[in-house]
Image: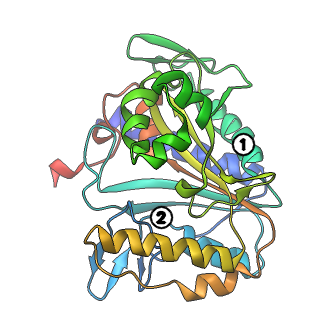
Amino acid sequence: MSPRLLHQRSLLMQAVRSFFYSRDYVEVDTPLRLPVLIPESHIVPFASEAQFLHASPEMCMKRVLAQGSTNIFQICHCFRKGEVGRYHQEEFTMLEWYQTGGTYFDLMDECEALVCGLAGFGHYLEGVDGETIQRDGRKISLARPWDRLTVDVAFQKYAETTAREAVKQGMFDELLVTRIEPHLGLERPVFLYDYPVELGSLARSKKGDDSLAERFELYISGIELVNGFSELVDPVEQRERFVQEISVARNLGRGESAMPEKLLDDLELLDETAGAALGLDRLYMILLGLDSVSEAVCLNEEDL
């Protein structure tokens, strides 16, 4: 990364912190190495001696909330084995935040405010004027409110099937990546929301329709930037979801995951909560007009 890009990344990092401080969030700093992780069948962790490097700070942050904190955020490095590509690195920088009393719709509003605020650093960022982003030869408007599209409508529109049928056929992820994501956020950012409940193991079931999860993802120029939930805080239901994730991981040959008992105990202490995770390297890549996440970090994995 050139000194100019490094300076811009530093300014953006400061702006992220200023955004949350201005909203009375408290910054936390939780461990990277844990004896037990949240069971997630689609994520392969790195072992670290007898422990693991975390894939996200979610478990520890929820335990901090259970101790009485309210709105908290964290910027940290996360680790996921085998996630390598134009928009992926096995080690990456995550912004994660939680607000008590909020829902996934509240977090969508906050995502808009955050990204628009960072884009307002237009006098530092080439190709960003605070109102539009240049990406792949097109202008993407940041005018609010951003588009919101349910998962099922997206599947019917772009994949010519329903989300429920895609899950049934084991084709959901493939269709999402190949048929749907390339259409998302090309003219303005879009929130894809209300996922099938099977694809939101940490998300609360939607009020009035328990076949759906109160989960969203934010897309800009076909790139997924944010994953957010109205958090599931029922320890009984969460345990059942974890059992399913552990079973899937076992069937995929990934060994046996331990149940995070301390997290389940702490869920009983949580009120309604919403949380989101944003890939900062991806966001900086988009705002700085870079081609891949490897260009948006101080030293990428190929430099080491």
Q: In this image, 64 relative to 285: left or right? A: right
Is residue 69 positioned above or below 14 on the image? below
Percent x, y of residue 287: 48, 29
Classify mark 2: helix, strand or loop.
loop
Q: Indicate the quadrant containing the N terminus: top left, top right, bottom left or bottom right.
A: top left
Q: Residue at x 31, y 28 (%)?
A: 291
Percent x, y of residue 46: 29, 71
Q: In this image, 264 relative to 163: left or right? A: right
Which colour scheme appears in the figure? rainbow
Classify mark 1: helix, strand or loop.
helix
Front in this rendered view, residue 58 or 177:
177
The residue carrying pointer 2 sits among few (fewer than 14), some (14 to 19) or many (20 or more) residues within 10 Å by Cα, namely many
Percent x, y of residue 153: 61, 29
Q: Residue at x 72, y 54 (%)?
A: 21
Q: Earlier in the sequence, mark 1 or mark 2?
A: 2
Q: Residue at x 72, y 42 (%)?
A: 110
User: Toward which corner of the image does residue 293 lie, by quadrant?
Assistant: top left
Percent x, y of residue 253: 25, 72
Would residue 8 be seen by someone viewing this image from the given angle? no
Is residue 101 positioned above or below 38 on the image? above
Callout 1 amino acid: Glu
The numbered disc on residue 125 is: none
Alpha carbons under labels 1 and 2: distance apart? 20 Å
Would residue 141 be seen by someone viewing this image from the given angle? yes
Total marks drawn?
2
| Residue indicated by mark 2 | 56
Callout 2 amino acid: Ser
Is residue 252 positioned above or below 297 on the image? below
Q: In this image, 230 relative to 177: left or right? A: right
Front in this rendered view, residue 22 or 237:
237
| Residue indicated by mark 1 | 110
Q: Residue at x 67, y 80 (%)?
A: 236
